[in-house]
């Protein structure tokens, strides 16, 4: 009768190895769950960090003042810009074209964002951004460069949008104030966020204030 002890020993070693691998997998899964989103995950909203300061050097002395009584905020905009909106509008758009941009136009949009019907108001900008990022993706936009920036001592969550499929590039900023999420967005026609448009947008955002 053949000796089967070596086979029994090998089988025991095999099952011990399987148990160890399963245990390691469970521990690793629990660790990753507790660690939260990884900085290497491009789809994860970044955790709050020290915001990058955005300096504004534009001369806004001759700019006009826009006041929205419905959404209770004010902002300044270039006198040469075309204002689309009233004091009671849900959305206000400033159409402008800095001289350096030649034939390229840009829009700066300001508005207050509400949670969808049946959903609790957003407790954080990050919670809002998860919904907004899904919407941008549904409109063929690709999000990048998610970060926090400081403009005139206000901290905004910022992200860029590449939507060349619809012939524009976007720069979006969001801030939670008095329980409400406010949006300031720049849209530039074409395939680049041109510096003159970004500079003008930064200046507009620097004047944004809640009444």
Image (cartoon, rainbow, N blue to C red):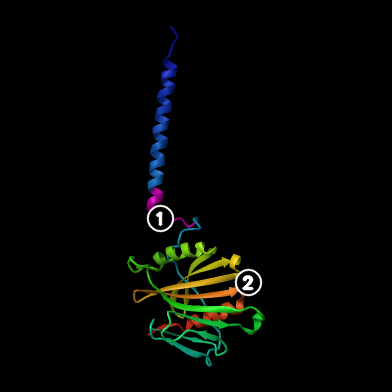
Q: Quadrant of residue 78?
A: bottom right
Q: How many labels, in total?
A: 2
Q: Quadrant of the N terminus?
A: top left
Mark 2: few/some/many CA within 10 Å (<14, 14-19, 20+): some
Q: Which residue is mark 2?
A: 190
Q: Secondary structure at mark 2?
A: loop
Please tell me which of labels 1 and 2 falls first in the chain: 1
Going by the picture, which residue comes out furthest to the right?
A: 102
Q: Picture coordinates of residue 181 (x, y %)?
A: 40, 73
Please, what secondary structure does the residue beneath circle 1 have? loop
- The answer to whether any part of residue 23 appears in the image is yes
Q: Nearer the viewer, residue 72 or 27?
A: 72
Residue 208 place in picture, x, y as percent: 45, 82
Q: Image quarter for residue 193?
A: bottom right
Please give the range of residues in magenta.
31-39
Q: Which residue is mark 1?
A: 36
Q: Quadrant of the C terminus?
A: bottom left
Whether residue 78 is in magenta: the answer is no
Decide which of 135, 40 is in the foreground and name it.
135
């Amino acid at each position: 009768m053949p000796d089967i002890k070596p086979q029994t020993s090998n089988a025991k070693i095999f099952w011990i190895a399987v148990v160890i691998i399963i245990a390691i997998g469970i521990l690793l899964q629990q660790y990753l769950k507790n660690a939260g989103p990884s900085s290497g995950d491009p789809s994860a909203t970044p955790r709050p960090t020290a915001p990058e300061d955005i300096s504004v050097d534009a001369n806004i002395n001759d700019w006009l003042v826009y006041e929205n009584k419905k959404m209770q905020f004010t902002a300044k905009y270039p006198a040469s810009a075309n204002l689309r909106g009233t004091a009671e509008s849900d959305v206000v758009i400033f159409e402008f074209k800095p001289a350096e941009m030649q034939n390229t136009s840009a829009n700066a949009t300001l508005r207050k964002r509400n949670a969808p019907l049946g959903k609790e108001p957003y407790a954080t900008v990050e919670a809002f951004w998860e919904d907004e990022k899904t919407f941008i993706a549904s409109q063929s936009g690709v999000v990048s460069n998610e970060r926090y920036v400081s403009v005139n001592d206000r901290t905004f969550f910022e992200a860029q949008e590449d939507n060349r499929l619809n012939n524009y590039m976007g720069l979006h900023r969001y801030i939670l104030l008095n329980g409400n999420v406010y949006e300031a967005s720049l849209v530039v026609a074409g395939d680049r966020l041109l510096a003159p448009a970004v500079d003008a947008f930064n200046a507009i955002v620097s004047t944004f204030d809640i009444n």
